[in-house]
Amino acid sequence: MAMNSQGRPSQPGAAEVASLATISGDRGLDHEEKLIFELGRSGQCGVDLEEVTVSDDRLGGLRRKGAIGLPGLSEPEVVRHYVRLSQQNYSIDAGLYPLGSCTMKHNPRLNEKMARLPGFGDLHPLAPASASQGALELISELAKWLTTLTGMPAVAMSPKAGAHGELCGLLAIRAAVEARGEKRLRVLVPESAHGTNPATAAFAGFTVEEVKATPEGRVDLDDLRIKLGPDVAAFMLTNPNTCGLFERDIITIAEMVHDAGGYFYCDGANYNAIAGRVRPGDLGVDAMHINLHKTFSTPHGGGGPGAGPVVLSERLAAFAPLPLLVADKDGLRLIETREGLPGGAKPFGRMSAFHGQMGMFVRALSYMLSHGRDGIRQASEDAVLSANYVLASLKDVMSAPFEGPCMHEALFDDTWLKDTGVTTLDFAKAMIDEGYHPMTMYFPLVVHGAMLIEPTESESKESVDSFIHVLKTMALEAKAGQTERFDGAPRLAPRRRLDETAASRKPVLKWKEG
Amino acid sequence: MRYLPLTKADRAAMLETIGVVSVDALFKDVPKAAEVPVSAFDLPDHQGELAVERKLAAMAAKSTASGAVPSFLGAGAYKHHVPAAVDHLIQRSEFLTSYTPYQPEISQGTLQVLFEFQTQVAMLTGMDVANASLYDGSTGTAEAVLMAQRVTKRGKAILSGGLHPQYAETVETVANLHGSVLRAPAIPGAEEDLASLVDDQTACVVVQTPDVFGLLRGLKNIAEAVHSKGALLIVVVTEVVSLGLLESPGAQGADIVVCEGQSLGNGLNFGGPYVGLFATREKYVRQMPGRLCGQTVDAEGRRGFVLTLSTREQHIRRDKATSNICTNSGLCALAFTIHLSLLGEGGFTRLAAINHQRATTLVDKLLTVPGVSLVTSTFFNEFTLRLPKPAAEVVEALAAKGILAGVPASRLAPADRDQRDLLIVAATETNTDEDIDAFVTALKEVL
C-alpha cells in the first residue's frame, strides 16, 4: 500500500473504501447524480419560446388529452446534469481503450468541425440536386477513396452501420444468385465470426452453417471444402480474423468459394490492420463492409452512430441498392427510385430512407485527407506494430493461444490464470482500478477466457509501455497469489460490480415515480 | 502525420523487442501477391489541418444550407432550432469518444442517459417500454415489421399508402424475405380502407401519422380491426414534435411505435445520422430488436445501469437473434434526450403548438395564390398542396429564386401520375413571417 510522508496510507484499502459512507452519496468529484425525472419539476423550462395560442386548430379532434410526464428543468440544471453524467464515463480522450475488434482510436476534432459546416450538417436530404452539389461531391470523393483503397470497382454508401453493411452485401449476393436463376440458400460462417455474421445471414433469409477453425486459429480448409456446394450462396470471413490473425490461405479460400459458384463476403471490421497495404479486391473478395469509425476514426458516441459502406466486386456492382449517385451534364445527382436507372443497374432495393450517414462521411473524408494514402498505410503499420509489441512484451507472463505475429490486436487466453482463482473477468475489472478500460473479454469464442487487446496506432510508446507495465505487474501478482485486488474489483470506479443477472431477470427499463 | 505518435526511434525499439528487423516481417502471413506499394493508390498524401479545412469548406459552400434561405422541406426530415447547450454537451469527450458501455462500472454516464432516453420515449409514445434507439425511423419500421412477423408467426405486412415511400421500400427490402408486403395505394389527403385488407394471415398493419402528405390519422378504428384478427398495429411518426400536440399512438391502441427522432437535437445532415425511436408493449419486450438499458444495483447496493436482455442479441443467439443490429444511435439519442430535457413538458408542448401555428399561417397565405388548393384537411406542421403545374418544376423555379419550397410528391413516387402536381410543404418554428411572405410572393411569380 502506498504511504504518504507521514507514514499513513495514501490510498484507502478496500474495506475503508466500502465503509466511506457519505451524506450526499457523492465521493469527491464522483457525483451521485439523480435521474432527470427526479430533478425536474413542472412549470420549469430551459428554453424560451414565444407564447402561442392556435385559435383554429387543424388537428381533426386528435389533440392530446393527458400529460406526457416530462420533467422541466432550467438550462443550468440540464447542463450540470449531463456534465456530471459525462464524468462517469471512460473515453478514448481520457485514456487508452484497448477494446480488441472495437478499435478505439483518436477522434480528431477537425472532423467534428467539418461535419458541422452548414453545407453538410444543415442540408436537407430532399433538397433539390442543384442545392446539394457540395454534399454529393463529398459522397463521390469518399466513394473514390474507398474503392481505390480496397481495389473494388463499386461501393454502396447507404448502410448505417457495420451489421447493416453486412446485410447490404448479402442482399446484393442474394440478388446476384437470383439473377443467375439459381437457388442458393446457405451461407457459411466460421465459428470464430462476429455474432452479427450469422445473425445477418439469417436476417437476409439464408440458413447458416458454421465452418470449423484450425488449432492455429484460422479457417479449416478441409471443413470448408466439405461444406461448400451448389446450394451455398456465400462464405463470410473476417480478415484479419477475430483471433487477430491474417488468413494466409485467403486467396485459396476465395478460389474455392468461387469454384463452388458462391460469393466471398469479407467482414471488414478489421480492415484497419491492412488499409493502404493490401487491397481486398486483389484477394478475391466480392463484398466487404467498412466500419468508418474503426478504420477512419469517426467517434462512436457511447455506442453509435456508425456507418458501413460496402465495396462490391464487378460481379455484384450492378445490384447495389438505391440511391445511386450519377454524374451528368448538370452535375451530380441521385437516382432514388427504379425509374430512370442507368443501363445495367439492378438495385436489390433500399437500405434506409435517404442516402446514408452523411455526417460520418464528412468525418471520414476529413480523416482520410489528413492522413493521406501514406498516413493510412503508416497507421495500419503502427497499429500492427503496437499490437505485436504488446504481444511480445506480455507473452512470457500471459499465455497467447496462437504462434506467430498478430495483426492489429493481440489475443491471450486464460491458461496462465489457471489455479490462481482469478478469472478473465476479475482481471479485466481490476484494470479499471488502475485507470484503464478493460480489453475485450471472452471474445473470440474459440479461445477460452479470451482477452483481446488492441492498442491502435494512436498510442505513443510511453503510453503502451505504461499499459504493459501495469498488466505485467497485475499478472505477476495474480500468479503470486496476491489476489486481493481482483476480488470484487473494481473498487475505485463510480460503481462497484453491477448485478447483471438481476437486471435481466426482472427488467426495469424505465423510470417510475416512487 | 499529426495523428501518429510513434517516432522512428520508437518504431525501431519496438521492432527490436518483438525481434524482427522490419514491420514487413509482421505482415508475413499476407500473400506477397496481395501487397501493393503506396504509389499504387491514386490518392493524395497527407495534408495539414488548414489545407483539409479549406478543401472541405469549399465543397460545403457548393450546397445551400437550410438556414441560409427560406426552407420548407420536410417529408421525413425537419429543420428545427437546436439549443446551443445540446451541441456543446454532446461534444464532451466522455460522451463523444466513449464506446458501447460494455463495462458498466465506468460507463454509467452513457447508461443513465439511455435509461432516461428510454423513459422519455415510452412517455412520448404512450407505450410501456422503449429501446436505446435504432439507426433511424425507416430501418426501425423494417425492424418493427420483422418483429410483428416473429410475434404473430404470420408473414403478411400491410403498409398504408400514407407511409413515406422510402420507408415502405426499406421495409420491402427485408420483410419480403420472411413473408410478403402489401402496399396499399396512396390516396393523398384521405384514409384508405385498410381494415378490409386485414385477414388471418396478416402479421401487422403499418400506419404513419401524420402521414407522408401531412394528414393526421386517427388510429382507434384500425387498431380494433387489426386486433380482432390477431395482428399488430405499427404506428410510424416521422415528425416527433407532433407528439407534443397529438394524442399518443399508445393511447390509440398501437402495439409498436416507431419514430424518427431527428427533429429533436439533431441536424439535418443530408439524411443521417438520425435516431430511430422504438417502443412497444411490455409483453413483447423479449422480441424487441436493438439495445436495452436496465436498472440494477451494484455490490454496495447503489442504483446503477447495465445493458440488459442481451440473450436476444446476436453475440449470444447468433443466427437466432431478434435482429442483426449490434449498435444504436447513441450520440444522436443523447442529443435527443438533452433537447427534450431542456424543453420539458411545457416547452415541448409549446414547441409543438408553435409548429402547428406556423403551418396554419403558411397554409392560409399560400391558399391565396390563384390555382393552389389544399389536399390535406388536417395537418400538424406539414401539408400537401395541389399546384396548377408539375411540382418538381415549381420547386426548381423557386430554388432559383432562393427558396426551398418543399418536396414534390413525385420525387418520392415518380410513377404515380396523380401525384405530379402535389407539393409537400412543412413549416417549423424556424420559419419567420418574412420567410412565409417571401414564399407566397415567389410562388405567385412562378405559377
Image (tube, helix red, strand yellow):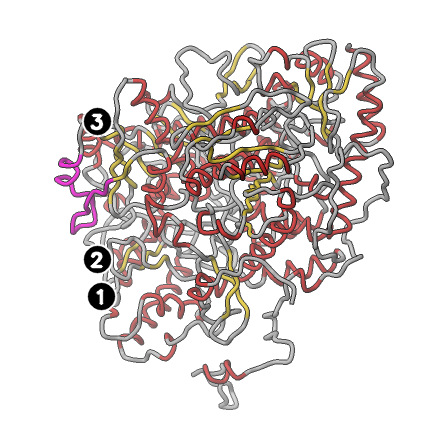
Q: Which residues are magenta?
A: A209-227
Above or below A278: residue B307: below
Above or below B267: residue A20: below
Q: Amino acid at mark 2?
A: Pro
Q: Secondary structure at mark 2?
A: loop
How crowded is the residue under tag 3: few (<14 C-alpha within 10 Å), some, or many (20+)?
A: some
How crowded is the residue under tag 1: few (<14 C-alpha within 10 Å), some, or many (20+)?
A: some
Mark 3 and mark 1: Cα distance apart in space: 39 Å
Of labels 3 and 1, earlier in sequence is 3
Q: Can residue B324 be found in the magenta stretch? A: no
Report x, y in % for residue B229: 50, 36
Mark 2 and mark 3: Cα distance apart in space: 31 Å
Question: Image quadrant for the N terminus of chain A?
Answer: bottom left
Q: Amino acid at mark 3?
A: His
Give the residue at mark 3: A258
Q: Secondary structure at mark 1?
A: helix
Q: Chain of mark 2?
A: A
* Badge 3 and badge 1 in a common chain: yes
Mark 2 and mark 1: Cα distance apart in space: 9 Å
Q: Chain of mark 3?
A: A
Report x, y in % for residue A306: 48, 42
Of labels 2 and 1, earlier in sequence is 2
Give the residue at mark 2: A401
Is mark 2 in CB contact (under 8 Å) with mark 1? yes
Q: Can residue A210 be found in the magenta stretch? A: yes
Q: Classify residue B443 by image quadrant.
A: top right
Report x, y in % for residue A3: 47, 85
Report x, y in % for residue B47: 50, 36
Give the residue at mark 1: A415
